[in-house]
Image (spheres, rainbow, N blue to C red):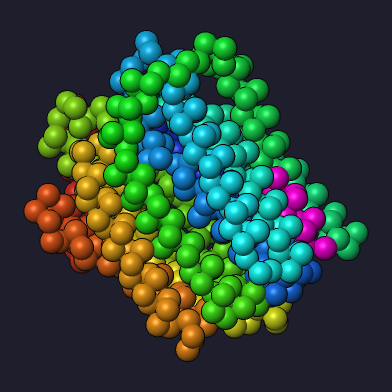
Amino acid sequence: MSIFGILPKLARRYWRYIANSLWLVSDRLLTSLIGLLVVAVVARYLGPSDFGLLSYTFSTALLFSVVGQLGLDGLVIREIINRPDDVPRVLGTVFTLKFAGHLLGAVGLVVYTLSMSVNSTERTMLLLAAVFIPLASLSGFFGLWFHSRVQARYNAISSSMSVLLVGLGKLGLVWMGFTVVAFAAANIVQVLISVALSLRFYKRQKGPPLSHWRFSPAFARMLLAESWLLFLGSIFGLIYLKIDVMMLRWLAGPAEVGRYAVAATLSEAAYFVPAALVASVFPKLIETAKADQDLFNRQFQALFDVLWLAGLGMIATMFLVGGPLIRFLFGVDYGPSVPILMVHVLSAPFLFMRIAFTRWTIIGGGATFFVLTEGLGALTNVAFNLLLIPHYGSLGAAFATLLSYATATYLTLAIPRRTRPIFIMMSRSAFMPWRTPKDFFDYARRSAHA
């Protein structure tokens, strides 16, 4: 049977997951486009220094919010799927743990802010970022429930509407000449709108009533015992994802942060595509892993192939249009962001495949390897930032990001025996791209006739 006969069968079989991915991608595409236009206007208006300060405060908030992650995001989806009759206990327990952690992170950020010698503007923005942390956890939590039911469209709609409304509000702040503090407050309004809409959709889809949620200490201990390694890995992951912004702030100044943030915004513009794809197929991968390990391995190889090619496509796109886009959208003040973008975007294939590897550690019980690789990534990122930022500023931070992702996501997987098959899968995707169409056709033919 030709590929034209197989693809319709395959599409019908996996339409639930394809539709879920399309909702996620559509949501993130819309929000990314709106966000990019708003960021461009705001960055032009504020200038590199104030825009850098705005980026720094919320990168700092993300670092402190890691306390509330607890490594539970993947586990809650798995538990909802595996315990359909016990969903209120799962939701109540995980929500209590995550919200308490985010509150602790917010308190930590307040203590950090009050202990630093900064001006009143920066202190106010950091305190607003502390308020942002627990509120953002509410919206994200309802999103996990929608993902577990492969109903991403509801989370997508609430996210898109909040971004659109607050984006218009930020344009109004520019028009009325508000200071940078107002833009920090607007981010809090955005997450409040998202929380309200997510809760409304949750109730409309007849999610277990909030009054039925219950906290189980025994279940909490079981989850924490399993997730503490993932939690530790999440800390390391956010460190090497966001520590560059904080180190730039203290080693090179807010203006360097602003130029780096513009490059990172464009480099990360399409990161939602692999995240949406992996989030959508994650429930299916869990089911396959329990039933057929060989099929699971084939599906994972196909996933790595798609993610690697998507990363290469991202690099090619940015090399072609990145420079003109920065000059057109952000203006001449951000001209130094162009070479930063060209280096930063080289990390895309590694980051894309990292998203899939993280899910593999949850499905296959490889949390130890997740922690080790994330820890090594954080260590190399900090080391290279310390070495390169004093000499090359934000360009050095971009090189540090590239080197840390290549090390943590790919090279280190060749060492442990347990992760070596993943290293081989990634190597096939990276160095044997000519086999991808044939492998995909074979997989599609088997899946269509299964």
Q: Which of 121 and 316 is in front in this view?
A: 121
Q: Nearer the viewer, residue 9 or 314?
A: 314
The image shows residue 243 at horizontal and vertical percentages of 47, 65
> Does residue 98 appear left or right of residue 369 in this picture?
right
Question: Which of the 4 image quadrants contains residue 126?
Answer: bottom right
Question: Which of the 4 image quadrants contains residue 77?
Answer: top left
Task: Kindly identify the residue that appears in the image at 21 percent across and 38 percent down.
Answer: 365
Count of numbered circles on the image: 0
Report the magenta stretch's main SS.
helix
The answer, for residue 1, to whether it is visible in the render is: no
> Does residue 40 appear left or right of residue 112 in this picture?
right
The image shows residue 186 at horizontal and vertical percentages of 75, 49
Residue 163 within the segment the image draws in magenta: no
If the image is split into quadrants, where does the C terminus sit? top left
The answer, for residue 116, to whether it is visible in the render is: yes
As drawn, 161 above or below 51: above
Task: Kindly identify the residue that appears in the image at 60 percent across and 54 percent down.
Answer: 111
As drawn, 413 above or below 319: above
If the image is split into quadrants, where does the N terminus sit? top left
Q: What stretch is highlighted in magenta?
A: 179-188
As drawn, 136 above or below 114: above
As drawn, 431 above or below 13: below
> Does residue 173 appear left or right of residue 191 in this picture?
right
The image shows residue 142 at horizontal and vertical percentages of 54, 29
Task: Kindly identify the residue that appears in the image at 40 percent across and 18 percent down.
Answer: 216
Check the image and name the residue furthest to the front. Answer: 115
Q: Which of 34 and 240 is in front in this view?
A: 240
The image shows residue 209 at horizontal and vertical percentages of 56, 13
Task: Kindly identify the residue that appears in the image at 13 percent across and 61 percent down.
Answer: 415
